[in-house]
Image (cartoon, helix red, strand yellow):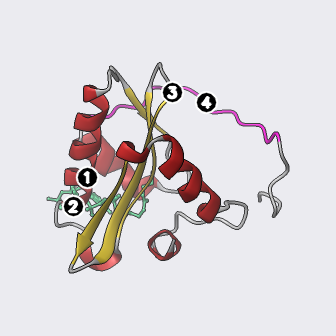
Amino acid sequence: MALWETTGIARPWLDLRAEIREKRRRDRKLFLVATVRGSIIGAVMGAYDGRRGWVYHLAIAPAQQRRGVGTAMMAALESRMARVGVIKVNLQVRTDNAAVEAFYLGLGYADDRVTSYGKWLVAPPVAKT
Ligand SMILES: CC(C)(COP(=O)(O)OP(=O)(O)OC[C@H]1O[C@@H](n2cnc3c(N)ncnc32)[C@H](O)[C@@H]1OP(=O)(O)O)[C@@H](O)C(=O)NCCC(=O)NCCS
């Protein structure tokens, strides 16, 4: 959770503690962390919904960025996904996070040219702005 706070993944309306708990219950093998001497310096949540693989919350600690850790974590996640039958991986990037575009393009991801819609079935604890 601290890593996601410092890397701009956290948002007031996200209950990260609940997300971690649920992800560990449902997709334990697709929830990866990278550590250095016991400290978490990278994390990514994967999901397989039976049709597509999805990637959430990839984050590398600022001091460890641009050392290939993000690339290695995505490779590890993709290989785990392939092993459980995923044929295509999707991910969403916030429109205000243009900096990450070069990273994903470099890994072979392409803009699918779709608009993502969402609807809360349970109101978030804090209004989404
Ligand atoms: C995006 C992120 C995960 C990349 O992790 P990383 O470990 O630094 O990435 P890598 O070292 O594997 O980078 C591989 C290549 O991607 C590109 N790249 C990575 N970060 C970049 C940046 N900020 N700007 C431009 N290109 C970038 C470069 O081509 C880089 O190769 P190079 O360092 O040899 O030039 C990391 O910057 C991060 O945690 N960002 C904040 C959280 C975030 O935005 N997550 C994505 C949510 S969708």
Look at the picture and state if 42 lies above or below 92: below
Q: How far is the residue under mark 4 from the one under mark 2?
A: 29 Å
Please name the residue that numbered disc 3 is placed on.
49
User: Is the CB atom of the residue marked by disc 1 within 8 angstroms of ligand 1's nearest atom?
Assistant: yes
Is the residue under label 3 in contact with that under label 4 (CB below 8 Å)? no
Q: Tell me which label, 3 or 1, sits earlier in the chain.
A: 3
Front of the two marks 4 and 3: 3
Front of the two marks 2 and 3: 3
Circle 4 Cα neighbour tier, 10 Å, few/some/many (<14 / 14–19 / ≥20): few
Q: Tell me which label, 4 or 2, sits earlier in the chain.
A: 2
Q: How far is the residue under mark 4 from the one under mark 1?
A: 26 Å
Is the residue under label 2 in contact with that under label 1 (CB below 8 Å)? yes
Amino acid type assigned to the residue bearing label 2 in the image: Val
Q: Position of residue 63 (x, y in %)?
A: 28, 80
Is the residue under label 3 in contact with that under label 2 (CB below 8 Å)? no
Q: Determine whether the residue tagged by mark 1 lies in a helix, strand or loop.
A: helix
Quadrant housing residue 84: top left
Look at the picture and state if 16 lies above or below 81: below
Which residue is nearer to you in this view: 3 or 107?
A: 3
> At x 21% / y 43%, what residue is drawn?
75
Q: How far is the residue under mark 3 from the one under mark 1?
A: 20 Å
Amino acid type assigned to the residue bearing label 4 in the image: Thr
Any mark on residue 115, and which?
4
Any mark on residue 73, and which?
1
Q: Determine whether the residue tagged by mark 3 lies in a helix, strand or loop.
A: loop
Which residue occupies the extreme front position in the image?
25
Q: Tell me which label, 2 or 3, sits earlier in the chain.
A: 3
Which span is picked out in magenta? Answer: 108-121
User: Is the CB atom of the residue marked by disc 2 within 8 angstroms of ligand 1's nearest atom?
Assistant: yes
Horizontal side, residue 126 vs residue 18: left or right: right
